[in-house]
Image: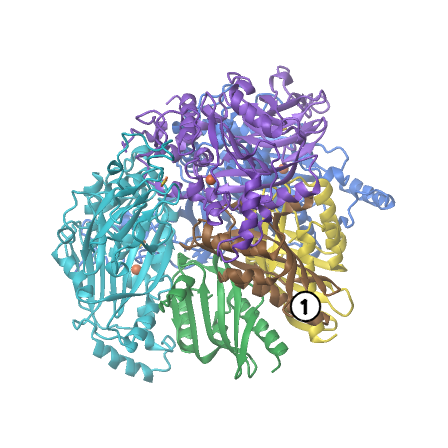
Chain colours: A yellow, B brown, C green, D purple, E blue, F cyan
Amino acid sequence: MDDQAVRLGVADLVAAYGDCIDDDRLEEWPDFFVEDCRYLVTSRESHEAGLRHGVIYAASRGMLVDRITSLRRANIFEKHRYRHVAGAPRILSVEDGVAAARTSFLAARIMHDGETSLFATGRYLDRIAVSARPFRFIERLVVLDSQKIDTLLVIPL
Amino acid sequence: MDDQAVRLGVADLVAAYGDCIDDDRLEEWPDFFVEDCRYLVTSRESHEAGLRHGVIYAASRGMLVDRITSLRRANIFEKHRYRHVAGAPRILSVEDGVAAARTSFLAARIMHDGETSLFATGRYLDRIAVSARPFRFIERLVVLDSQKIDTLLVIPL
Amino acid sequence: MDDQAVRLGVADLVAAYGDCIDDDRLEEWPDFFVEDCRYLVTSRESHEAGLRHGVIYAASRGMLVDRITSLRRANIFEKHRYRHVAGAPRILSVEDGVAAARTSFLAARIMHDGETSLFATGRYLDRIAVSARPFRFIERLVVLDSQKIDTLLVIPL
Amino acid sequence: MSVQDIDVDCGVSGPSNGISEVPFRLYTDPEQYRREQERIFKGPTWSYLCLAAELPHPGDWVATTVGEVAVVAARAPDGAINAFVNRCAHRGNLLCLERKGSGREITCIYHGWSYDLSGRLTGVAFEKGVKRAGGMPPEFRKDEHHLQQLRVAELSGLVFGSFDPRAPDLETYLGPVVAGGVKRVLEGRSPRVIGRSVQVLPNNWKLYFENVKDTYHASILHTFLNIFRINRMSQPGGINIAENGGNHFSFAKLDYAAEDEDYKHEQLRASNEHHLEDRSILDSVDEYGDRISVQILTIFPGMVLQQIRNAIAVRVLRPRGVGKSELEWIHLGFADDDPAMEERRLRQGNLIGAAGYISMEDGCVGGFVQRALQYNDDEAGIVMMGGHEAESQTFRATESAIRGFWKQYRALMGT
Amino acid sequence: MSVQDIDVDCGVSGPSNGISEVPFRLYTDPEQYRREQERIFKGPTWSYLCLAAELPHPGDWVATTVGEVAVVAARAPDGAINAFVNRCAHRGNLLCLERKGSGREITCIYHGWSYDLSGRLTGVAFEKGVKRAGGMPPEFRKDEHHLQQLRVAELSGLVFGSFDPRAPDLETYLGPVVAGGVKRVLEGRSPRVIGRSVQVLPNNWKLYFENVKDTYHASILHTFLNIFRINRMSQPGGINIAENGGNHFSFAKLDYAAEDEDYKHEQLRASNEHHLEDRSILDSVDEYGDRISVQILTIFPGMVLQQIRNAIAVRVLRPRGVGKSELEWIHLGFADDDPAMEERRLRQGNLIGAAGYISMEDGCVGGFVQRALQYNDDEAGIVMMGGHEAESQTFRATESAIRGFWKQYRALMGT
Amino acid sequence: MSVQDIDVDCGVSGPSNGISEVPFRLYTDPEQYRREQERIFKGPTWSYLCLAAELPHPGDWVATTVGEVAVVAARAPDGAINAFVNRCAHRGNLLCLERKGSGREITCIYHGWSYDLSGRLTGVAFEKGVKRAGGMPPEFRKDEHHLQQLRVAELSGLVFGSFDPRAPDLETYLGPVVAGGVKRVLEGRSPRVIGRSVQVLPNNWKLYFENVKDTYHASILHTFLNIFRINRMSQPGGINIAENGGNHFSFAKLDYAAEDEDYKHEQLRASNEHHLEDRSILDSVDEYGDRISVQILTIFPGMVLQQIRNAIAVRVLRPRGVGKSELEWIHLGFADDDPAMEERRLRQGNLIGAAGYISMEDGCVGGFVQRALQYNDDEAGIVMMGGHEAESQTFRATESAIRGFWKQYRALMGT
Ligand code: FES
Ligand code: FES
Ligand code: FES
Ligand SMILES: [Fe+3]
Ligand SMILES: [Fe+3]
Ligand SMILES: [Fe+3]
């Protein structure tokens, strides 16, 4: 697949991912990942210090599915949504059908009563399978700029 | 027009639209729409509930022109500007020269004294005439994530 | 270089510039500029009023290097980082190997304790040398929407 | 202006001359604000809760606030609407976390205490302990821990609540004239919510409520109608103020036919620079057959019922701290609207709300006042247009309705 | 509920019946909050400062807060750990600007005054002036301007500080049972920080600290374990409360083998819709060989030591204004963890923290209470589950540990 | 430090020993802040309003604040500059909504009351009602409702205002020495604004104003000049303090020629790692022919006039709540600047402002102090460098000018 196609495909993937979450189509969210994937949410401070314990750690797509099942069935919280706004993804390398990419993003959080705040900022560090369509995340490392999380984190970022 | 051309053209249209507003070149704003257009600003809550009454409803380019005339001549408010920051537009379909697209965005509001706040977040749901240049909006539905509007909404989003 | 290549190259340059700063790789920052460059940070109000005195004014790459040396060796401040989120750059013109472009952006500021705020919004007005790789800024005018700066400005925008 | 004698810690004393001088500190003093919660919003007044139409079936509930206090309005199995404080009797948790819902009972998420739809405590998890260990002590009685109830009254499909047994019944409270104004707009019709939004106001709640009663500012602050030379014909109208002072409505008539005439001539004057490209936002019909094109009605302390041509809306004003308020716009249509009327209401919707051509200024002007009073509030504003009393008047160059507000305000605040 | 007699300007008086009624205003009154800083956080209590492991070498320091007060904990050349107020004796500048650092001395950025690692003022720039001009007056004595010191005590690698000489020594303060609970988890092991994050809580600090002591809510608010039918087998356990009331731990045992059995059968029931796709977040070992799978321990006023299976964490609760708190999660591993144990702790980490399956609700429920009390706080919550005393109990359908909190709280606040 | 006797509700009592101890609570107490608005900013002091050059023509006005109070400075038809409160006499609306403007009169947007450029009420919409109905009552007199005026005085193109008739005339207030310092920089020249920005300071206003008077911190907090080994030659200089204590200037001389010499040698030392790649930010000329390269002048309570080489600026300090301030930087050039001088001022501009090499630290250090005092403010800072008095001195290792600030502060606050 040529550079241009990878570039556009990754851009589409990153945008579609944000829309999926922001639309509350969370049951579709695990499908953005390959079966044997890793999804982590951590802070820049921990990431740079080599501390591996973040706030969310999924080592399989099953764990992503469980996140959503728990969100829908078990966990109790006030209704809210995010709005992801991301910059242009940068392709850092493409090797053996795997693209490494990074994207700066922010997520605003909108509570059910309309209260809006800047909930999170950070960067996505991605490893993406690009040898076949649809592109899927092999690893998505969400490095938040802040170690602070307001109230709770239940909807994935 | 090929996919790539539509993609780039829509991206340019969305970016130019934001700059037009943020630069206070509001007299040019109606020209981003076809004559027989629709422009609506509403909230996600109303949109999902099927409530058609939003905060701005224009059913013709004339109504867009009137918005700007009123803003310039009639309405009284404190000077302010927006800064639009939008993600990459996603083309959902292209049929019969009409592209359906969606774009996540946020708008910061900067008052004349410099006070800055996160004024609005949401998504643009667009239907765009792409069979001829320049691309123009047939319909631009601005779905705000929040039902709350601070103070007033006079400059279009 | 064809339009498409310039478009992509400028998008890469703008994204890489933001990542360089947000990653605290500030020693690399001056390399985004040609030797005989101009870098200014000012406010929309001053810019539109034709007031030339902004908050940062560099008229050579040496002055950019000095900014970083002073930041690293001389100035005292609380550790913090930015997160740049920029919209799509718009190419306004390409003449004699120089592209004129503009980009809307925001920068969140994240203090070392995680406190996050919307620090700055504005637009980049760029003149970029595109006749050779890597693309470099001949002039980068950072026009902030607000004349207010919280606490201090030491990390470049 | 006479400087007021003010005690920051004990709220604000009354103006020196009755109701036509308003000490600025009434808008800035936190202690005064706290007292208003007790004496006005929890006092002998009626606050809008919801539309009866929002509670069609037993079990339906709506969570709202009376002043700053979270309350729930719910329809019980017997069809009656009840209202009670949205705060669990156990540790004070918020019971209903969404704006609306439905269910046989209301269960607290924290420890599972459950209440029926009249706020009666019906269940306490582990009340008897687990395997006879633990549980509530023997002297504990569920019926001593019901949620605080509000009185509820309904008029023309609007549901009101009151914390205070001393409040007169709703229609007496409104007075016959204002009650009539409500019925004129809503009685015997089936309202449907066609839109809803919230405008955040950077000012004390009173500044907005006064504004709605302020006929003086209409043609001066809102220049849209003049600039575009809309209904310049003389408009007979007037202001009706209830006995208590706090409730009122102002109205104006319009010669709809004359306006259409006028519109036609408008077409010929293409030269005129300030004309509307698309006048459809004004296409309106005499919905009530009485040529009243504008009726703005207020119910103390926080509700507005608006009819502007065919744009019908309930506005709910909610205090949110001494210098902030929220104004909810509930746009109404009716079950018998045909598509043309639906479209008409939507287009006229451009006139009102946070982006309304003739209302947006009211969203910012209160904030301008609030700002001007920051650390500069030891004087008083004057409200003498049209005299010093608060009686109904047939002319609109008056601040009579604002004096009416202060008449009731002072009676309740005891200042 | 009995209405409380409350004086806004003078804090909140005590509940009418001892420790099983809690006036809501205790969570909302700014003056009460200010007093808590003086009487509790600066009073005869012990606050967590850091891990000894964070100060491996002389010169290492960590900046933290005790209540709202900025303090520094540092290891002196003699190896002792000192703590002192992080505020320069000259003009009050914050001395240490980062969370941690190291150096021979601490120098103020503003005018260069320097302090040794016990907070003693050792240098004053230009003390003698420049060329004999200026400088400090002759009567100035550096040793009258040392930084205020805190007492420091260490237990099982946890470092605590106290402003008040009247505080009993740490182990006496904790009491033998709670001290034993700390040692069980940490004594003789070498903890390593494997992760750190901060959860911002939109509520008064007490609401969270009560929540951790609240065994009543566990199975009701946190439904994850029930929904996914995890360890449904009866869990022997109990609550141990220290003499002073403020320190405690609750615990429960688990039949690890039975759970594995259960897990196997789980596989057969693929039909079951609420099963976990990946149960590895639960793979756990009986790390302490006593089958205690959960031990939640609190040290008044702001520390929690948690063992949930193999997820070990210290939680530090920091008040940040009357309606806001910060909860720092310090996730621990140990030097002898093998890769399997490391991975186990990471996966179990999904259970706890701001995104934890069985803890996230605690991040929002306090805010719900806080909101419900806004301008509606003149009543009291009740804490009578399991009686009116604050003694240790073998059952969990009790609020005994919460009463313990109020026992110590009232003793310190003198109400 | 001696603990201060402080009454939160009644502001802060004075330090125990005159002006060389500063109770920390002076920076944190909201009531103290409210009093400062009355006694200092509205008291017998002079506050900077604008440059006379900003009001070239009759009708020109500038909206600003004195303390927190919104005021307007305007040039009347007779050429005189007036100042008055920016708050409508009717209901208190903010009259001027932009930073500057021009017009024959000032009309309130709310109800159209109009004022002339001296703040006199000249028009009341519908004063006589409409068609003889409504309008203001007969006893209403426009001339009883003029806007509160400020006294106005001008010095070297700087315009000042005062609320208090007791304030001495401006030059007496400044004192001959400080007045001379102003004239040295501005008299007989035609200043032009070449840039403007606002730096938001996370601290009480006094912390910044003290900072400007604090010669002690200069070489310690701001290390730029030392690190890059700029003007290391001894700099004769000193501090001049006005009789009242609140106004002052400090200055230092520079051997411009020697610096150029020094610069040349700098070139040879390419090895030196800390050298400037581009020294053009330092290219400066002895603009005033007196070899004074730095003159920092303060006018109590909130103005700074700065000459640093050829970087000339007025700084206006505005309190914005007890823990926040805004600092406006107004960068000046002069009508006779040639292009080289214009460029010089722009390049030297890198030294100052929110991003200034030798000023940025002043933007954060006040916030560090403010933070260190949160809930830890019952002690006092000491200001004894150079003694206990507030007299002018020829050396800079002193806090004399800060003591001067407290001398005037205490005189005005009556503590
Ligand atoms: S707070 Fe509602 S059940 Fe405990
Ligand atoms: S404040 Fe620390 S040395 Fe002056
Ligand atoms: S407030 Fe100014 S005219 Fe009414
Ligand atoms: Fe209005
Ligand atoms: Fe819990
Ligand atoms: Fe300084």
Q: Secondary structure at mark 1?
A: helix
Image quadrant in which the N terminus of chain E is located: top right
Q: Look at mark 1 in the image and give the residue it sits on.
A: B7
Residue under the point 29% across and 54% down? F61
Task: Give the x, y percent position of residue B71.
Answer: 49, 53
Residue under the point 57% across and 60% down? B30
How many labels, in total? 1
Task: Give the x, y percent position of residue E64.
Answer: 46, 48
Task: Give the x, y percent position of residue A142.
Answer: 63, 58
The residue closer to the viewer here, D255 or D348, is D255
Residue under the point 67% across and 48% down? E350
Give left or right: position of E310 versus F110.
right
Q: Considering only vertical position in the picture, is B115 above or below F114?
A: below
Q: Residue D245: which quarter of the image?
A: top left
Give left or right: position of C74 versus B34.
left
The residue closer to the viewer here, E196 or A147, is A147
The residue closer to the viewer here, E213 or D70, is D70
Image quadrant in which the C terminus of chain E is located: top left
The quadrant where ligand 5 appears is top right
Can residue D141 be spotted in the picture?
A: no
Can residue E383 be spotted in the picture?
A: yes
Q: Chain of mark 1?
A: B
> Crowding at label 1, few (<14), some or many (≥20) Cα neighbours within 10 Å?
some
Give left or right: position of E20 versus F63.
right
